[in-house]
Image (cartoon, rainbow, N blue to C red):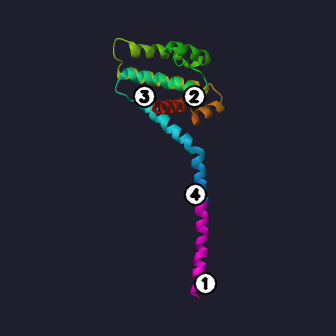
């Protein structure tokens, strides 16, 4: 009688083991498929927070411009790395005329190289305009390109490889 109960208990727990195995394999597959994208998203959010939240107002404005350029690169638009902001803006205005990138380049140059220090309100307004331009850039590309930019951002990959090259 006790042997039958022990056998029955083992059999009753077999379904639990099978369920845990299936759940474990499924979770592993999800992590393998989406883990790199989540990791890159975390890096991108951290980079944006660092750019937007610095103490120096001029650096925050320069960070807003860098955010705009990175978005353009992520959506497949080549931007000259050694070019000035206005040269970059000219290239971006050709590709995204509705985004109003030229005015943002002029404001960034004024904020970084101007005589005075930009106020908190000016920096906030600049970042709001950058967010509007970034939205315009993203809307102007096809959905596949937007999806690729979200899950495989070129700007984050290049930053990772550049830092790795400096360490070795």
Tell me: residue 160, above or below residue 109. below
Where are the magenta residues, as a range? 1-21
Alpha carbon of mark 3 to alpha carbon of mark 2: how far?
17 Å
Circle nearer the N terminus (3, 1): 1
Instruction: Report which residue position mark 1 lands on.
Output: 4
> Alpha-carbon neighbours of circle 3 within 10 Å: few (<14), some, or many (≥20)?
some
Circles 3 and 2 in contact, beta carbons < 8 Å: no
Judged left or right of residue 45, residue 142 is right
Quadrant where the N terminus lies? Answer: bottom right
Instruction: Report which residue position mark 3 lands on.
Output: 51
Circle nearer the N terminus (3, 2): 3
Seen as rendered, the residue at the extreme top is 115
Instruction: Report which residue position mark 4 lands on.
Output: 24
Question: Residue 92 in the image: x percent, y percent?
Answer: 57, 17
Alpha carbon of mark 4 to alpha carbon of mark 3: how far?
38 Å
| Res 93 quadrant in image | top right
Which residue is at 34% across, 17% downward? 117
Q: Main secondary structure of the magenta part?
A: helix
Alpha carbon of mark 4 to alpha carbon of mark 1: how far?
31 Å
Question: Residue 8 in the image: x percent, y percent?
Answer: 60, 79
Tell me: residue 59, above or below residue 3. above
Instruction: Report which residue position mark 2 lands on.
Output: 74
Circle nearer the N terminus (4, 3): 4
| Res 9 quadrant in image | bottom right
Please tell me which residue lies in front, 142 or 157.
157
Alpha carbon of mark 2 to alpha carbon of mark 4: how far?
34 Å
């Amino acid at each position: 009688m006790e042997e039958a109960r022990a056998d029955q208990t083992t059999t009753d727990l077999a379904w639990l083991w099978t369920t845990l195995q299936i759940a474990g394999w499924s979770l592993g597959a999800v992590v393998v498929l989406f883990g790199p994208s989540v990791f890159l998203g975390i890096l991108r959010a951290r980079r944006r927070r660092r750019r937007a939240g610095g103490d120096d107002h001029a650096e925050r404005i320069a960070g807003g411009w860098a955010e705009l350029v990175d978005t353009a690169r992520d959506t497949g638009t080549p931007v000259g790395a050694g070019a000035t902001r206005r040269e970059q803006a000219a290239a971006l205005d050709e590709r995204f005329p509705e985004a109003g990138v030229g005015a943002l380049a002029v404001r960034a140059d004024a904020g970084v190289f101007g005589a005075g220090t930009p106020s908190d309100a000016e920096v906030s307004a600049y970042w709001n305009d950058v967010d509007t331009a970034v939205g315009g850039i993203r809307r102007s590309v096809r959905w596949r390109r937007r999806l690729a930019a979200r899950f495989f951002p070129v700007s984050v990959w290049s930053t990772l490889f550049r830092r790795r090259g400096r360490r070795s």
